[in-house]
Each structure stands twice: as structure tokens, then as C-alpha cells.
Image: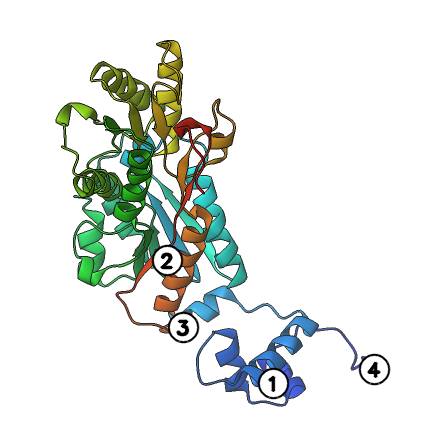
Amino acid sequence: MAHSNDTPRHANLEDIARKAGVSRSTVSRVINDEPYVSERTRAKVRAVIDAVGFSPNPAARMLVTQRTRVIGVVIPHTLLVTFQDPFYYPTLLQGVSEMTNERDYATLLWWGQSYDDEDRFARRILQQNRLMDGLIVASATSDDPLIPRLVELGIPFVTVERPARFEDRVSYVSVDNVQAAQNAVTHLISLGRRRIGTITGALDNVDGQDRLTGYRSALQNAGLPFDPALVAEGRFTYQSGAIGARKLVKAGADAIFAANDISAQGALEALKEAGVRVPDDVAVMGFDDLPISVQSSPQLSTVRQPIQQKGSVATSLLLDLIEGKVEGPCEILLPTQLVIRQSCGALLY
């Protein structure tokens, strides 16, 4: 009995090439996201691939392209302690996930543990660098050993903040933290506040440093003196916000600029416990515009930064670097917006 020629089998590159009316090498270039294929031809080949349900062999594709189609996202353990909030990193990772899904990449998350020191954490990542085509460094301390090693080895990576070192050799996506903080404090000054204190972020982190610089610039521009007694060093945490607020009230602050919303929430709670009225006695301003900013009482005035967009733009930039679509280093600054609510005592018109 003869076998039917209609026996189902898996499509291969030759099948796709024949159906699309192109060469096998063109199909290979489309599958591997290589250049020199017109958008019209690329769309035609992809339509055939979708129609036949073709799925390329990952191992074979890696041998051809020398790529894994996996990127790493690094969240250092020191920043897990520093940014103790349930919103920032999940929102950032959502932006990363959206872009990797759109461009058919997978994500490997490097989540440091409390027992890791920075050197050991960096070594672990670099030892496994063949698993990844590149890295997004979600945040880092000023002396993080990972950054210089990535620069030295030429591994594609993007930081989600202004780098503390090697700025002319590192691609990054961030916001203008100096200008954003300056705008926030300038608004408090415009409301007649003159003893404006700040609860800083972690000062071994560039975002924390830049927001303190913006605070000082606003005072200087308004002709107000900088008083060290009105600076409470924080760690971007709820607890450091509460401790900082108590210190600033004792120093006679009539307004507080907190370096993030989580520490601002700690400040609001400490002020409430101390019988200090917000905004009547002390105005409060945060930074981030996390969902909790509208859940607090009073609702928190803050600086809105596009956290999810930072994740997606950083991922898009990294993938473009990996695929040779752009040459680094690239600097992208996303816009921020001052959001005025009840905690500062006035609306922004």
C-alpha cells in the first residue's frame, strides 16, 4: 500500500522559502532579525512562518547568530534594602516584560540576596554572561563593581539611571532628577515656605545624590540659605522617612521634600503621630507618584516619573544595541511632571 504524500510533517526553511517565494537565506535572515531584508519581504516571510506554525530550534539559531535572545535584569541586593517598596521594581519590570515579549526575547532576573556582597554578586553574573545577550542594570551604588567590569568586557548593557562613573561609555535611560527635584522644592518656596527640609535618598545612589543637588539648587536660586540641620539622610525607606521627619520638625522645618514616595509616607505617619498638621504646619512633597500617593491622607504631592516607560525604553535601547541598530553610548532622559495634591496645601494652576 502506497504512503500518502499528504503525511503531515514539520515545515523547514526550504518550505517557508518556497511558499514565500524567496531564498532560504532570506528566510534565515528574517528569523534571526538580521538586516538587509525589506519590510515588505520580512512581513511576507513572517506571515508564512505564522501560517505553518514554524518554530526555529533555539540551539541551532544560537549557533548561527551567536545570540541567546535572553537579556538579564540586575537588581543589586543593596538596592533591595534601599528601595523597600512594593511598587517601583514590579512596575519597572512590567515595562521590561512588555518590550521583551514584543521583540521575542526572554528575561533572566538577577535578584541579589542579603548574604551577597557586591563583588560576589558581580562575579556570579559575569560567570554566566554567555546565557545572555546583554544586561539591564536596574540600579546600582556609586562604586558598584559590576559596571566597570561590563565596560571592560564590552558586554552590551543599559542602566536605568545616570551612571556614577564611565558616563561617556555607558548607555542609560533616566529622568533629570536634578531638575525634577528643583521644580518640586521651587513649588514649595512659591507657597511661602522658607524652612524647607529634605529627607534624602541613599547617598551612595546617583538618584539620591541628584535629588539632593536639585534641592540645594532650588534654595540657592531663591536666595535661601542651605542649612545642614534641615537635611535628614535617608535610604528611600518608610522607616528612614519617619525618622527624618521627626528630626526636621525639631529643626523647625515648615516643609519637607522627600526623595521618594515611600519615605514621604513614613514622614506623613510620623508627623501625624506627633500632632503636626499637614499641610497647615508642614507641607510634604514626594517623588515617583506611586499608587500609594493617592491613598494617603492627605493625598501626596509628588513628582511623577514614568517608571514603566523607563523599563520599556531601556529594554528597547538594549535590544537595539545588541542587534546593531544603534551604536552606544546613548543617553535618554524621560520627562517628569509635578503633581500637586493636598499635602503641600495648594493646587498648581
From mark 2 to mark 4, how far is it between C-alphas?
A: 49 Å
From mark 3 to mark 4, how far is it between C-alphas?
A: 41 Å
Q: Secondary structure at mark 4?
A: loop
* Mark 4: amino acid: Ala
Which of the image's four quarters has the C terminus?
A: top left
Q: Nearer the viewer, residue 340 or 142?
A: 340
- Say which residue label 2 marks: 132
Quick check: 225 left or right of 271?
A: left
Q: Position of residue 342 (x, y in %)?
A: 46, 28
Establish if 163 lies above or below 297. below
- Say which residue label 4 marks: 2
Sort mark 4 into few (<14), some (14-19) or many (20+) by Cα contacts within 10 Å.
few
Q: Residue placed at 29% from the left, 46% from the top?
A: 177
Sort mark 2 into few (<14), some (14-19) or many (20+) by Cα contacts within 10 Å.
many
The numbered disc on residue 236 is: none
Q: Secondary structure at mark 1?
A: helix
Whether residue 83 can be seen here: yes
Q: Secondary structure at mark 3?
A: helix
* Mark 2: amino acid: Met
Establish if 292 lies above or below 324. above
* Contact flag, marks 4 and 1 (Cβ < 8 Å): no
Q: Nearer the viewer, mark 4 or mark 1?
A: 1
Mark sitting earlier along the chain (3/4)? 4
Mark sitting earlier along the chain (2/1)? 1
- Say which residue label 3 marks: 65
* Mark 3: amino acid: Thr
Establish if 235 lies above or below 105. above
The numbered disc on residue 17 is: 1
